[in-house]
Image (cartoon, rainbow, N blue to C red):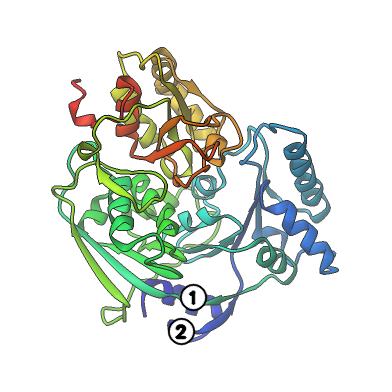
Amino acid sequence: MTLTEKILANGAEVESVQAGQFITVKPQVILGTDLTAPLSIGIFRRMKATRVTNPDQIVLVVDHFTPANDRRSAEFSRFVREFVDAQGIRNFFDVGRGGISHLLLLELGLVVPGDIVIGADSRTCTGGVLGAFAAGVGSTDMAAAWALGETWLRVPETVKVEYSGRLQPWVGGKDMILRLIADIGADGARYRAIEFCGETIDTLPLSHRTTLCNMVVEAGAKNGIIQADETTLNWIRPRAKRNVRLFRADPDAKYEEVRRYDVSNLAPQVACPSISSNVKPVEALGTIHVHQVVVGSCTNGMIDDLRVAAGILSGYTINRKVRMIVLPGTQKIYKQALEEGLVATFTDAGAVVLPAGCGPCTGAHMGVLANGETAVTTTSRNFAGSMGDPGSSVYLANPAVAAASALTGVITDPRHIKK
């Protein structure tokens, strides 16, 4: 079996599973946010359910509109808080106490290797970085899982992606996944598991691995997953709230497809409007003027990502025609950025640092684009209207490209910034 199949077989309490099979599992984590949970709460009540089966399965995070940006979002948050109190849900993280749900799960050890995680948010797949099966579901499925303590899944086929070679400076996980999405297409891995492996993965920091798993849904994948190794265990051992269960793919596992990449000559990549598979090397773009730059989010909002951006900005001032927004992934990351002087570097350069949350990535809060404006962002999506007006343009890039572009006012190869 593949790594995903091993975890799902264990969760279904059967000896083996195969791609295409329908199974029932009890997830260790069911994730909801202020954006998705209110709909689930309404469905839960229409189902005539009164109590969740297991409050400790449930994690609810206020992260999309935090602090609340209008009366409607304030009502959403209140709705969630009342449900939390009524159901005795302990893992609830409100304004100032958490951050973006997907990174928070990793930071707090709420996801551990071998887990099955579902959540009513497409980026739930981020949890696969720890060797867990993590996948997004609809709000109806989440409500049913609350009520029953279990959910159904179709076992996905698996695409194996093997990376070799050594990454060049200013190139990382964002560039690796953008190149893959470009090659496989926006729906080329539809309802597939993507299993990342290879010598490059073995030496890749956890932050870069997180970006890989976070963005697999941009190729239509059900989940992304990386086998837990020493890097994983060094991260999770001091944090884990439950026992770790380590699984390995069998040497003779059946994969639907195997893709191999040598990253030695991979340049920084940029996804151009208005689909994440429209990818070009940064040096091939020509002159594209920028109005707004965003560094952070659940895709590139870990402390390593902020360090990269701050390293480029240090001692410089951003272009006067550019607005730069920095979005730490969690409150703890924000605090660490303060302690390391990164926040001072950002503010000295002329950027603004937002509270830990989804912010401008939703296109509804703290960084909305106007018609005709262009943004370079480390977030995960660039469809028309993804960050505001449908007439705006969004380019996806790594933190180094984003920071370099903030300095020059045009999309810039960070290798051209002299430090």
Percent across and percent down for residue 352 are 49, 21
Q: Is residue 14 above or below residue 98?
A: below
Q: Kindly tell me whether residue 410 is visible in this rendering.
A: yes
Name the residue that disc number 2 marks.
17
Q: Residue at x 40, y 48 (%)?
A: 235
| Amino acid tagged 2 | Val
Residue 350's disc is: none
> Between marks 1 and 2, how big is the CA–CA gap?
7 Å
| Amino acid tagged 1 | Leu
Name the residue that disc number 1 marks.
8
Q: Nearer the viewer, residue 159 or 188?
A: 188
Q: Residue furthest bottom?
A: 15
Q: Nearer the viewer, residue 51 or 412?
A: 412
Percent across and percent down for residue 314 are 31, 18
Q: In the picture provided, is 29 more to the left or to the right than 52?
A: left
Q: Residue at x 45, y 64 (%)?
A: 223
Percent across and percent down for residue 410 are 31, 26
Q: In the picture provided, is 223 more to the left or to the right than 183?
A: right
